[in-house]
Structure formats: structure tokens, C-alpha cells
């Protein structure tokens, strides 16, 4: 979105990466000035924002978002999902390919890309499907998607695993031509037929079919070896087990070009939550044990896990208000991700705010190859994609009042630390005073699901 | 007791009260007029999402002998086949004023959701949910074991039951077969443990769940060794579903013959047991697979008596559910 007279802003006393306070001027889409409080030149008409005590981060980048459009506008639209992303502090999201129709052609990825631009809340980078219709049988036209206006660099059949080893090898090799990456949903399909939750003590007691850790770990082990063999770049989606962390750590030690992500929910929730059979806790991969939660936190802190990605998976009420085995997998996350990372990693002393910027902005931007414009340093002349956070605030989460069109948050009723005060996309405020700025963005091109 | 959903966490006093009440109910069932006026004017709905004629009939008989009005709501020929959700069905039953809902469902947790999701305020009695629990089956098994091995009732089922107030302390029960998929096994392990019995699960390793180590029981992969060396007082055979043998590489054991050889119960294995031991099966039986005809029809088999006891136990459960005499709600969160 371009504006005739873009509003300039001055953030007074903001703390970049949680360090010493500075004044920051945003004008003409970039960081126009940055210096000790009271020392910067402020352009006429700039809006003053009292940012004392607030942490200033590069705008967050999500490598794993389900925007549901086209196809499931009853759950979310590009407009409503990206508006939720802005509310959560994001300035870019990667829209997963499991739409209807599938994002497996240049046409569909360009449609989603265009919807994202029209919405104007964040940069939308469509993920391309690896195989036609996510069928796992035939490579989609990866080159056409890469060459399209959407410039796809991340390819994934997320929701399904590229389980055929030959097909996976070909995909890993093929995307090298355009510096792409295959983002694998690691789930051995035969080991997880009918699977409902983590296989272990809880599943044995409550009688739900188990999703064993080995079904994830065996695919990751295979894929890192394939990536090594063909010299390709591999990204592991939503890693969830202690064993997966160990395999990725081993692979990195060998110099294999692998990156890994963990979701906010796998950083804090466990399979004990399945005991009441509330399907809001049904997710894929499933919530694991407390030992796994500790392992992924450790992996994130030591760099084995490169990024936190939301796997934001909105679903309409009727897909969750039913028997556990009939319910859809997935939970929302865009508006709680930063708070969960603060709670589990920053407030526990395991990571700094600079580390948060690394795992929620810089690394995902680099993996998605959008690091020319996103995940940039908070520095003079850089694009003004920024997030201002009040780390001392506390919120009680309520799915009904969130910005996303769906209410399937696993954190309903829980108190989380931190609040996004403002989000800037190329200098334009998409969130101010903790609320989305509706006049700033475009207009919804379809209304279903974007109603709130 | 508002609901009966699971035996995991069921208090011992409540379990014994259920068994004692069942004994009182059973005593009335030898009369010419078997009907009691206890639940006159109350409505019990049998909500069955799975075919189970024997369990439905057992609950229906129990409710009718307590003079309740019974409504049978089965998945076939109802709105369920048109895709109505569990929630909408629950709201409908609520609107119709059901006092108790007896639910059988293929989804683990369906009974728990009916009881706790806020869709209806009737008492919920779990008649089997997926692979999770089937508490009245475990209660009728415990009742049958107690009558014979504590109460002094003979193999012929005759004689006074002197077991009122007693638990099953010191008794050894072997549960044999498809533990992995069995709500009967899960229900029995917890109830028998609560009542003081020792339990050994016997199954091929493929039919034992990962995570079984927290269950209050032992696990053996060898039936003969268990029978010979452990000398159980009761042997409970589980039904083996035909589909567990098929599925090619997904089959749980190589062949019915091999299963039968290693885990089938027959007259030879029965002869190894102590003289007082009894043989149970929740039915329906696969004769020739998990149990031979000779064992099933043996005088020490109490399988037919289990059916009769099922009515008494379900009368007790409905009575206590609707009259509220048991101390606490049954909920698995209170489990060890």
C-alpha cells in the first residue's frame, strides 16, 4: 500500500532487542534516524509514541501459517489471517500450500500472493506444494512457482509427509536450481494410521490411537541423510520430540544444511491435556511429554532449532466441537506466539530478546529467502518492518476476542506475558496502541471469516 | 455419583457399594415379579452409536426392571446416519428431559464429553467408549468373581452369596488377549486393582499398548507360564477382533492358528488352574480362536452367569446414578 503523505513516527525510549533506550524515527518506509533519547531529528508531523520500557524487534516472520484461502474461508481468509498476524507482531508470513485448490501451480500461488498484497497487513509469501494436490506421487511444477510473481522459495506438502524417499530426493535436488528449500512435515504415514495423540502413558490410559515419536524421527533421520547425499537444503517443520532434536543436532554437527522449527505450543503444552478429550488440544504433530518440551526448549536455546513458527491452523467451531477422533488437527497461534516464547524462553532466562529476534524474524526470513526486506537489523536505513512489545504486560487469552476468524486457541483462559503494542510494515502502522489499524490496510476481498 | 464414566479413580467404597447394591438387585431377580418401582417416572436413554445388541438389551432390561421409561436411540435409522453431531443429539436429549443417558460410542472420550461439555445435565453412564473404558463390564466381572471366590457361591451358581462388603484382596486375575484395543481390559485393570486383586495381562507384545508401564498390573507374553507358575484364581479371556489378523504387514499376529496355540484357552490350560478357579469372557466369544468350546462350556466357566449379573450390576449403577447415593463423582483426574 502506498500513501500520498506517509505518516512518520518517532518511538521514544524504545529498547532495540531489549538493550538501552533510544529514539527511533520511521519515515519513508525506513528507519530514518536512531539515537540516544532526545538526540534525533524528528520530521514535522511525526506521530510520537511513548515506547519507554518497550522492546523493539525486527518485524516477526512466520515460516508456517495456514491462511485457509482459497477453500476454507469459513475458518480464515488471507485478510483475516494476515490481520491476526499483524496483531501478533508479524510483518511477513509464509502461507502453507494445503488450500483448496492446492497451491501447486503458479496460478494458485499468485492468487494467494495477490490476496496478501491487497490485504496489506503483512507480506504474504505462498509456500508451494511439493507434489500435485499434496498427493505424494508426482512433483508439482516447482520451477513455475519459483518463477511466478509469488517467487516461491519454500516448498512443502505440510499436513502430509513427502514419504516416498525417491520423490523426496528428487524434490531436494530440483529446488537447488532456484535456491529453494523443502520443508518437510515429518510423519511416517504407516506408523501413524488413525493416530490421534502422542503414543505413550497417556494414550495407553485414555484409549486413543498413538502417534509415536519414531514416526517423526525416522523421517527426519532419512531426510538429513538424503540432504547430505545430494547437497541440498532441508527444513524440518514443527519438530516435536527429544529424539528429533538429537538427530538435527547430529546432522548439523556433520555440516548438513538442515534447519528446524518448533511451534509455540510444543514449547509449553503436553499430552496430559488430552485427558479431558477437548479437541482444542488435538494437533499434528501431537503434544508430547514434559521431557520432549524440555528438549525442544534446550534445542531452541542452543541453536539446534533455528526458528519458532506458529503452524497457525484455524478451524471453525464445528470441526472442534465434537468427538476427539472426529475433530480436525490444529490450533491457532499467530496472536500468542511471541508471548509463549517470552514465557518459556525469555522470562526463564534461557534466551535474550536478541535471540527472540533471531528465531522469530532473522532466521525464518533467511530460510524463506526474504531476508533482503524482512528480518533485517534494527538500524539506520533499514526497512521499517518492526514490532514494539510491552514485555511487562499480561493478557488473559480469549479465543472469541482474537483477531483470527477462528477461536481454536489452546491458551483460552490462560494468562500470558507480553503484548504487541505496535507493528510497522515498511513504516506504516498495522497495529498501534495494541489494536489493529483498520484504516491502514486494504479491504477484504471476501467477507466470510473476516467478519471480525 | 453423577456419572459413571471410568473405573480409573473410582473410590473403593463406591465400588463396593456398587457391588453390594448389585447383590441386592440380583436377589430380587429370582422372584416371580422382577420389577421394582424405584425409578418410576424417570427417563433413561440408551444412546448407542455402535451395534451392541447384548449390552443394549442388558441396560434396557435393567432400566425396565427399575420401572424407568426407556428410550432406545441407535445410530442406525436415526438422525446420526444423516450426520447429526454428538452435540446436537445431546442437546436434543436434554430438551426431551432425559434423566440418564447410557452411551456406547466408537470414539474414546465420547461419554466424558457428554458428561462434561455442558451439552446436557443428565447423568451419563458409559456403556463403552472406543478403546477407553466400559465400567459396567468391569463391575459385573468383579461381581461375578466376588460371588464365586469370596461369597462361596458354587460353580453351579447356586448357594448364598456371603460376600457383602468384601473386596477382592489377594485374588489373582489373568486378563488374556487383545489388551491394546480393549476397553474391557482397561476397565478391569483399574477396578480389580482398587478392589485389592492382583492382575496380570497376558498378550503377544503387539497387543500390549506402549505406555502400559503405569498401569497397576503385571504384563506377561506367555499364557502357559502365567497359568502354571502364577496360578490365577480367575482367567478372563478377551475377544479378538477378526480385523486384527488381517491387514498384511499391519496384522498383529501371524495367523489365527498361532494365536490360538499360544493364547487360546482350552481344556488343557484349564486343567492347570486351581480347582476353585473360574473362567470369564465378556462375549461375544470366538469359539475356537481365543477360547475353545470345551473351556467355554466347562462347569468352571461363568460366562453365562456374567450375562445375568450384568443386569443386576446395571440396575445398581442406574439406581445409584439417579438416586445419588455414592459419595463422589467418578473422574479419571482423581486417578493415581
Image (cartoon, coloured by chain):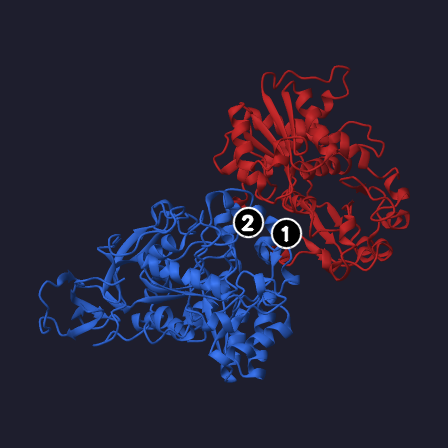
Number of other residues with Cα within 10 Å of mark 2, as a class: few under 14, some 14 to 19, many 20 or more: few
Marker disc for residue B199? none
Q: Tell me: residue A277, above or below residue A7.
A: above
Q: Which chain is blue?
A: A
Q: Which chain is red?
A: B
- Position of B307 with respect to B322 (left or right) is right
Residue B232, given in percent of the width and then of the height, sits at 78, 48
Give the mark nearest the N terminus, 1 or 2.
Answer: 1
Q: Tell whether label 2 touches label 1 (CB within 8 Å).
A: yes
> Nearest the camera: A158 or B139?
A158
- Position of B184 with respect to B255 (left or right) is left
Number of other residues with Cα within 10 Å of mark 1, as a class: few under 14, some 14 to 19, many 20 or more: some
Residue B61, given in percent of the width and then of the height, sits at 71, 24
Q: Is residue B24 visible?
A: no
SS assignment at label 1: loop
Chain letter for mark 2:
B
Chain letter for mark 1:
B
Q: Which residue is mark 1?
A: B216
> Can you say which quadrant of the picture contains the N terminus of chain A?
bottom left
SS assignment at label 2: loop
Residue A245, given in percent of the width and then of the height, sits at 50, 72
- Position of B222 with respect to A142 (left or right) is right
Residue B21 quadrant: top right
Q: Which residue is mark 2?
A: B336
> Nearest the camera: A257 or A252?
A257
Is the same chain shared between marks 1 and 2? yes
Q: Is residue A25 visible?
A: yes
Q: CA distance from mark 1 to mark 2?
A: 10 Å
Residue A177, given in percent of the width and then of the height, sits at 50, 80
Amino acid at each position: 500500500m502506498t500513501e500520498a503523505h506517509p505518516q512518520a513516527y518517532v518511538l521514544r525510549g524504545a529498547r532495540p532487542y531489549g538493550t538501552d533506550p533510544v529514539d527511533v524515527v520511521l519515515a519513508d518506509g525506513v528507519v530514518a534516524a536512531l539515537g540516544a533519547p532526545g538526540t534525533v531529528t524528528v520530521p514535522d508531523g511525526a506521530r510520537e509514541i511513548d515506547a519507554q520500557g518497550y522492546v523493539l524487534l525486527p518485524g516477526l516472520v512466520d515460516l508456517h501459517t495456514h491462511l485457509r484461502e482459497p477453500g476454507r474461508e469459513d475458518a480464515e481468509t488471507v485478510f483475516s489471517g494476515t490481520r491476526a498476524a499483524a496483531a501478533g507482531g508479524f510483518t511477513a508470513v509464509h502461507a502453507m500450500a494445503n488450500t483448496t485448490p492446492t497451491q501447486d501451480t503458479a496460478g494458485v500461488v499468485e492468487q494467494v500472493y495477490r490476496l496478501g498484497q491487497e490485504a496489506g497487513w503483512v507480506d504474504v509469501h505462498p509456500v508451494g506444494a511439493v507434489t500435485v494436490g499434496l498427493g505424494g506421487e508426482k512433483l508439482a511444477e516447482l520451477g513455475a512457482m519459483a518463477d511466478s510473481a509469488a517467487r516461491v522459495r519454500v516448498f512443502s506438502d505440510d499436513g502430509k509427509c513427502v514419504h516416498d524417499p525417491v520423490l523426496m530426493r528428487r524434490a531436494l535436488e530440483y529446488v537447488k536450481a532456484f535456491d529453494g528449500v523443502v520443508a518437510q512435515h515429518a510423519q511416517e504415514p504407516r506408523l501413524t494410521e488413525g493416530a490421534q495423540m502422542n503414543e505413550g502413558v497417556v494414550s495407553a490410559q485414555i484409549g486413543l490411537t498413538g502417534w509415536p515419536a519414531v514416526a517423526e524421527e525416522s523421517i527426519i533421520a532419512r531426510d538429513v541423510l538424503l540432504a547430505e547425499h545430494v547437497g541440498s537444503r532441508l527444513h524440518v517443520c514443527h519438530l516435536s520430540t527429544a529424539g528429533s532434536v538429537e538427530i538435527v543436532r547430529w546432522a548439523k554437527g556433520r555440516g548438513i544444511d538442515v534447519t528446524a522449527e518448533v511451534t509455540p505450543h510444543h514449547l509449553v503444552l503436553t499430552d496430559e491435556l488430552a485427558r479431558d478429550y477437548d479437541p482444542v488440544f488435538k494437533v499434528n504433530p501431537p503434544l508430547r511429554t514434559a521431557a520432549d518440551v524440555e528438549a525442544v526448549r534446550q534445542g531452541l536455546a542452543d541453536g539446534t532449532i533455528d526458528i519458532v513458527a506458529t503452524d497457525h491452523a484455524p478451524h471453525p467451531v464445528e470441526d472442534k466441537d465434537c468427538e476427539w477422533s472426529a475433530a480436525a488437527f490444529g490450533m491457532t497461534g499467530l496472536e500468542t506466539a511471541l508471548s509463549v516464547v517470552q514465557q518459556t524462553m525469555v522470562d526463564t532466562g534461557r534466551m535474550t530478546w536478541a535471540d527472540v529476534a533471531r528465531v522469530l524474524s532473522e532466521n525464518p526470513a533467511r530460510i524463506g529467502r526474504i531476508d533482503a526486506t524482512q528480518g533485517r537489523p534494527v538500524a539506520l536505513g533499514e526497512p521499517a518492518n518492526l514490532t514494539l512489545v510491552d514485555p511487562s504486560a499480561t493478557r488473559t487469552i480469549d479465543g472469541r476476542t482474537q483477531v483470527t476468524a477462528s477461536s481454536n486457541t489452546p491458551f483460552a483462559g490462560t494468562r500470558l506475558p507480553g503484548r504487541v503494542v505496535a507493528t510497522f510494515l515498511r513504516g506504516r502502522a498495522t497495529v498501534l496502541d495494541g489494536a489493529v489499524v483498520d484504516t491502514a490496510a486494504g479491504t477484504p476481498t471476501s467477507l466470510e471469516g473476516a467478519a471480525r | 455419583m453423577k456419572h459413571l464414566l471410568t473405573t480409573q479413580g473410582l473410590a473403593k467404597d463406591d465400588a463396593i457399594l456398587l457391588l453390594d447394591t448389585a447383590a441386592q438387585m440380583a436377589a430380587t431377580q429370582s422372584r416371580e415379579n422382577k420389577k421394582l418401582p424405584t425409578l418410576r417416572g424417570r427417563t433413561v436413554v440408551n444412546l448407542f452409536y455402535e451395534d451392541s445388541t447384548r449390552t443394549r438389551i442388558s441396560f434396557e432390561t435393567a432400566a425396565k426392571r427399575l420401572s424407568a421409561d426407556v428410550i432406545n436411540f441407535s445410530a442406525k435409522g436415526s438422525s446420526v446416519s444423516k450426520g447429526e453431531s454428538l452435540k446436537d443429539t445431546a442437546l436434543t436429549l436434554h430438551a426431551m428431559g432425559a434423566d440418564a443417558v447410557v452411551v456406547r460410542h466408537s470414539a474414546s472420550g465420547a461419554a466424558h464429553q457428554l458428561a462434561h461439555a455442558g451439552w446436557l445435565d443428565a447423568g451419563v453412564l458409559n456403556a463403552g467408549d472406543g478403546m477407553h473404558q466400559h465400567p459396567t463390564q468391569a463391575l459385573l466381572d468383579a461381581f461375578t468373581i466376588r460371588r464365586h471366590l469370596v461369597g462361596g457361591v458354587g460353580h453351579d451358581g447356586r448357594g448364598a452369596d456371603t460376600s457383602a462388603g468384601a473386596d477382592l484382596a489377594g485374588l489373582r486375575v489373568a486378563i488374556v488377549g487383545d489388551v491394546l484395543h480393549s476397553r474391557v481390559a482397561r476397565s478391569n485393570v483399574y477396578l480389580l486393582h482398587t478392589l485389592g486383586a492382583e492382575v496380570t495381562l497376558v498378550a503377544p507384545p503387539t497387543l500390549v499398548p506402549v505406555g502400559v508401564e503405569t498401569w497397576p498390573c503385571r504384563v506377561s507374553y506367555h499364557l502357559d507360564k502365567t497359568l502354571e507358575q502364577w496360578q490365577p484364581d480367575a482367567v478372563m479371556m478377551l475377544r479378538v477382533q477378526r480385523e486384527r489378523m488381517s491387514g498384511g504387514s499391519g496384522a498383529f499376529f501371524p495367523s489365527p492358528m498361532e494365536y490360538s496355540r499360544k493364547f487360546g484357552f482350552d481344556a488343557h490350560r484349564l486343567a492347570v488352574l486351581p480347582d476353585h478357579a473360574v473362567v470369564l469372557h465378556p462375549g461375544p466369544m470366538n469359539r475356537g480362536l481365543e477360547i475353545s468350546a470345551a473351556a467355554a462350556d466347562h462347569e468352571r466357566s461363568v460366562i453365562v452367569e456374567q450375562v445375568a449379573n450384568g443386569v443386576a450390576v446395571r440396575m445398581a449403577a442406574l439406581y445409584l446414578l439417579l438416586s445419588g447415593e455414592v459419595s463422589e463423582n467418578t473422574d479419571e483426574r482423581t486417578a493415581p
